[in-house]
Image: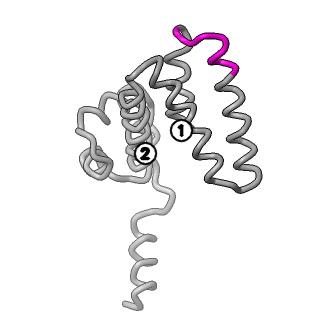
Amino acid sequence: MTVLLYSLYKIDACISKEDSRTILEEMEQALQGLEKRNLGKYNQHIKNIFKMIKSCNAKVKEHLNDVMHAARIKKGTALLEKGLSIGQAAGLMGLSNWDLQQYVGKTNIQEHEHEAVHAEQRVKNALQIFKVT
């Protein structure tokens, strides 16, 4: 859905009013399919919308890549907040360290490092879990 909305945003300037109405109708039909739990109907209407988008702008794959890249960066940031290093988070998300560093540099994530559970307590918890005391 994110890619669809982003793609619609990108083609707004080149789409006719008639095509806009058709897209809205397709979206309403897709919503009805979801409400009735008819995923086949939903998928068909979404495919129809993407066909219309492709007829106006063939860069839908680029839009998908942009959205997926942004999602990987956001997830990598969440991993940083959980305590992973930039290298570990970037590696897990298939990003370069540079991609993640650029985003983190614009935020204040690294300034808010705090331990929810102190290291000594984590060790005690681990020992209890594995019954090593």
Span highlighted in magenta in the image: 14-21
The quadrant of the image that shows the C terminus is bottom left
**Does residue 133 show up?**
no
Q: Nearer the viewer, residue 118 or 85?
A: 85
Q: CA distance from mark 2 to mark 1?
A: 27 Å
Q: Nearer the viewer, residue 123 or 34?
A: 34
Mark 2 or 1: the one toward you: 1
Crowd around label 2: few <14 · some 14–19 · many ≥20 (10 Å):
some
The quadrant of the image that shows the N terminus is top right
Residue 33, percent across and down? 71, 48
The picture quadrant where one finds residue 9 is top right
Q: Helix, strand, or loop for circle 2?
A: helix
Q: Amino acid at mark 2?
A: Lys
Q: Helix, strand, or loop for circle 1?
A: helix
Q: Is residue 117 left or right of residue 25?
A: left
Mark sitting on residue 75: 2
Q: Is residue 95 magenta?
A: no
Q: Residue at x 54, y 35 (%)?
A: 2
